[in-house]
Amino acid sequence: MDSYYHPPDLAKFPDVGKDAPELWEKFLGWYNSVFTEGALTEREKALIALAVAHAVQCPYCIDAYTSGSLEKGATPDQMTEAVHVAAAIRGGASLVHAVQMRNKIDKIGM
Amino acid sequence: MALVTLINTRSPLAAPAAQRAVLEAMPLERGFEDALASAGQHPLVRTETRVLQMNLGKRCNQACHHCHVDAGPDRLEVMPDEVVDTTLGALERSGIPTLDITGGAPELHPRFRDIVTRARAMGRHVMDRCNLTITTLPNYADLPEFFAVNAVEVVASLPSYAPTQTDRQRGEGVFEASLEALRRFNHLGYGREGTGLVLDLVTNPVGAFLPASQLALEPDWKRELKRRYGVEFNRLFTITNMPISRYLEWLEQSGNLSAYMEKLVQAFNPATIAGLMCRDTISVSWDGRLFDCDFNQMLDVQVDARGPRTIADLLSAPALLQQPVVTGPHCFGCTAGTGSSCGGATTT
């Protein structure tokens, strides 16, 4: 194995249920319900998933929700904007901690 | 425009037999006949024939990357006069209510307008599968008016309302030319409520994935085409790309063939079967042979040998009733997800 990540491994995801089938079934039922159309459309949910996949930097999820978003009718520009939202939150999350830095500067500075 | 036809590039896949061999060699988890049987739908049989689809030939002013016809400006195959006349004769005596005209760009056929006016004179509903850009060429600029006068339903190709997506599949500048054409159709009343002039759009995925839900997409497309470009249309049809001809070659070359075929097989949906076009459409090739659909035509898989095999043999529509539909691995393309046929999704 030359990498921890192999594209064919995505199809093996259900194997995770083999040693804990009840937990897997509960996860799968909940997961499928989450992505069913409700107050949000299936496309909106796929775009959220795509953005989160980038935020958590999961190659499996990026693979799955790139296809998933396209198959729900999202366009590449919409998908790119969704990833920018994730990136902006990640960047903003770093930057907003500068408030703590500034608080510390104020506390220990003269 | 670069000529990307398989014939022009001397691709082995230019031969339908080579395409069939590739598809039949795929290690699929089950065959299409098995899938039909598991759904209690084997054998798949024809119902009442309601559409006569006439493929006027492979000539086209475009050379789209995904074309299942391998059409293009360099193709010479066009329906001869005698086949045109025989087909119109069959349309008249059979009583089939709809004539669906396709190609290539069918409007390039020298008898195109004659075919339309004669079919309309018989009282038949006429549909034209239009690539839109043909109406921006000088000799064909009056086509929208001709269509309007003859109340032809226009079924126009537009894979995406995103310009880059459309151009990637259909060629540089096609999106802008398509918009120009759509605006002219709208100006004549096409796509507008209450005019009776029907303008449908066909979208197919720009890549190796399934189309989105037609039901979910149509309102988005109507909103976005109106908001971005002031364009209106009546219905949106989603069509799955079939692993045939240039799209098959692209799947192979891009390393997507196995995954795409697996996706089609895994997405088999028995609910799509009732609405499949192969059951109520008879497809006539430029040389007058009969096929269960345009895809079978491109793979050179003719209708069942027990019934009429050429348009000259088609004496009446009931002659096709209950004939088995000839199927193959490519048929998984029409039964995946919400289904796919010339009228778009076959389920909701």
Image (spheres, grey):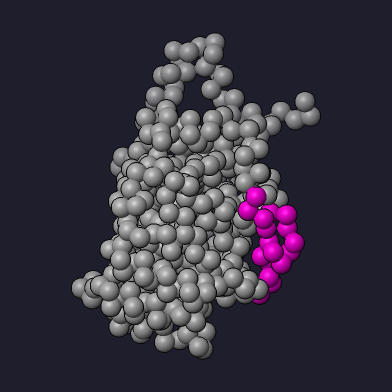
Q: Measuring from the top left, give residue B165's x and y in whole percent.
A: 55, 62
Relative height, residue B4 to residue A41 (above, below): below
Q: Which residue is drawn at 41% across and 87% down?
A: B142
Q: Residue at x 39, y 26 (%)?
A: A30
The answer to whether residue A74 is left or right of residue B270 is right
- Residue farthest to the top, as pictured: A19
Q: How many marks?
A: 0
Quadrant of image for the N terminus of chain B: bottom right
The answer to whether residue B18 is left or right of residue B166 is right
- Residue farthest to the left, as pictured: B194
The question of residue B184 being in magenta is answered with no
Q: Which residue is drawn at 69% across and 32% down?
A: A6
Q: Answer yes or no: is residue A29 visible.
A: yes
The question of residue B7 being in magenta is answered with yes
Residue B38 position by quadrant:
top left
Relative height, residue B286 to residue B109 (above, below): above
Q: Residue at x 36, y 70 (%)?
A: B89
Q: Nearer the viewer, residue B133 or B100?
A: B100
Q: Measuring from the top left, give residue B327's x and y in whole percent.
A: 49, 43
Residue span colored magenta: B1-17
